[in-house]
Image: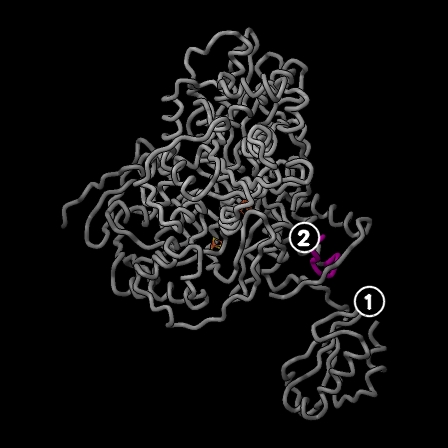
Amino acid sequence: MPVLPAECLEESDPRFARLDEVIERYGRNPSALIQVLHEAQKLFGYLPEQVQMRVARRLGLPVSHVFGVSTFYALFSLRPVGRHRIQVCMGTACYVKGGEQLLADLQERLGVGIGETTADGRFELQAARCLGCCGLSPVITVDGDVYAECKPRLLPAILKKYD
Amino acid sequence: MAVTERLPLGRVAEEVRPEVELVTLTIDGRVVQVPAGITLLEAARLAGMRIPTLCHHPALPPEGACRVCLVEVEGRSNLVPSCQFPVADGLRVRTNSPVVREARRTVVELLLARHPHDCLGCVRNGSCELQELARQVGADPDRFQGQPSSVPVDDSSPALVRDPARCILCGRCVRACSLQAVGALGYAYRGLATTVGPAFSHRLAEVSCVACGQCASVCPVGAIVERDDTARVWEALADPARYVVVQVAPAVRASLGEALGLPPGTPVTGKLVTALRRLGFRQVFDTEFTADLTIVEEANEFLHRLAEGGPLPMFTSCSAGWVKFCEHFFPSRLPQVSTCKSPQQMMGALVKTYFAEVQQVDPDSIFSVSVMPCTAKKLEAARPEMGGGGRRDVDAVLTTRELARMIREAGLDLAALPEDRFDPPLGAATGAASVFGVTGGVMEAALRTVYEWVTGSELGTLEFAALRGWEGVREATIHLDGQRVRVAVVHGLGNAARFLRALEEGAPSPAEGPGQGRPYHFVEIMACPGGCVGGGGQPYALDPEVKRARAAVLYREDSSRRLRLSHRNPTVQWLYRHWLGEVGGEKAHRLLHTTYQPREPY
Ligand code: SF4
Ligand code: SF4
Ligand code: FES
């Protein structure tokens, strides 16, 4: 079972007021749970515990029920996702030609582990299975843009393009 | 064409409808008529077939989670779960074909693949439904090898222990907890990663679990069980420096026999006392004594509130699960909850003060044990506001199930033991105290006293028919010297939640009278369905009739007693006169009343 981040949002965070509006818009109807969670995720980027508790209370549902739904559907995320998603190919060809080094370099540069998001929410780092462009190895992608024959020294320039 | 058998309809029919419609279907080649609206599982039971089940529980809505109850229906390519499949005219069902037997066996074998095989060390060994099921279908426990769950044991609650590794994901606890309107437990994740437990992997003590134990009483395996306090009690009993006393709640004497091989509804009061003496308890007291005391204090509190105009309605406070539920979910009602401690805690307080004084025992050497039908009593006894001077009122709480284990371990044959009586002075009780163990009983006992205090005359009949029975909410109006007093009895927290929400929405307007616009004056709430006879610490029972058999024992104890009004208990009267002082007085308040604290819902 994955360990979830302990997040602490301020009660005064304006996104809570917007979330409340969404819930009101659905008439506090518990059967609108999935839609509400969907909009909550758009607001917060993911579904932290405080948000799920808020949704649960206002819809009159137990948190356990909301949690059951948010962990059941793949479209919901329980951890922060970055604005930009970096994937480093770990297929055999890329791996042999330095993919692993790219991954290590990115981890150090961004200060995050694999599957994590930077504190400022800018990048999310992932190790990918073969991305299917072995001729261009080693490969990384950022938001789907492919960077072929990538070297650690090229990384700063690449990252700069994504804000 | 075979002869159509009309099956004896029994309870199933009554529960469906009196003017029941019949459908005709074929079960294993027999043409049978059964009531419309039931499931194939129930129809097969009527036809004398015991289809194995696991996630199904008669007290819970069906879920169809386990697929153990599969049967073949002609014309369907897949086997269907009989616990969910409704009967219909002309169905041809096979409950016992090779395909069905093989499928069921495989389902059970897949469950066993992830379930630990260390049955001998499990507290449910011998009472586990999975063991029984494996035996029934002839499962090979080693046919599949699965990855057992690595979620750690949760022993954060003073009442219950969850061991997710033993969980077979049947969801019974989830349904029980949601019927209790708590919803502390739920399914999470999916596929092989599926778990059952509180949200965000919290532990039970961190969520609004009220410790009612209804989850534990329906879990078919050892994945949610009461916290075992027998070791602490054995240890105290073996320590010559400790003065170990015990008290026994009413509902225990009506159910203990079941856990030791006697039929439901066997009263074991006298034998139970003997068993406790043989286990080594120095004094065997009766919680019914303090039930009488509770009634005296509570009736007095009620009459005060009635005279002073509130806060009303007054809610009873003996059910520890209800109290915790109110703190989490209806904190604004807390001022309306009676401040009386429960009988368990009143006894605990008296044992370490009054009894210690007259017996000249150092209260710190006393180890005070209670035997309760209830897991929430473990939580109640551990509440910091209970007790005084850093001393707990009650040191250890055993459930009926745990006491049965101790009796078995000691090699005592309950059925063969002679009868004995509770010890004076804290062992004398009236019939009013016995009915405490059934839903409606506290109200009935309180009204007997209130009526006589107010009107100065005895009630014609001591049994309040309107307050007995099994409806989730029952109510009555009594006339107290020209005042109309409306009372209600609620059992099961789901019913309590609906009842309180209706109150909030300003439901039915009150009878005229002193309630000043409040619809009820006095409300009994019990956390468990049926009251203590259905408590979360009672022997496991799938048959809902068992609760009624237990209740019948308590009603008989009441009607066979000479004294049936709490305030007439001579020992209670003596205690006030010589030691406690006034009813509701300063000393009574210090020892016998308590406080509550609002909590967050989770
Ligand atoms: S003890 Fe009661 S409230 Fe707590 S998890 Fe079990 S059923 Fe729910
Ligand atoms: S804990 Fe028990 S009742 Fe709950 S899902 Fe697991 S096996 Fe079923
Ligand atoms: S008993 Fe029917 S699906 Fe579980």
What residue is disc 2 on? Answer: A52
Residue type, numbered disc 2: Gln
* Residue name at image x 70 percent, y 64 percent: A79
What residue is disc 1 on? Answer: A120
Q: Earlier in the sequence, mark 1 or mark 2?
A: 2
Identify the subunit bearing mark 1: A
Is there CB contact under 8 Å for labels 1 and 2? no
Magenta span has B135?
no
How dense is the environment of label 2, judged by Cα within 10 Å: few (below 14), some, or many (20 and up)? many
Residue type, numbered disc 1: Asp
Identify the subunit bearing mark 2: A
B94 and B500: which one is in front? B500
Which region shows up in magenta?
A42-50
Q: Secondary structure at mark 1?
A: loop
B522 and B596: which one is in front? B596
User: Which corner quadrant of the image does residue B582 belong to?
Assistant: top right
Against B58, residue B488 (above or below) is above
Q: Position of residue A51 (x, y in %)?
A: 71, 53
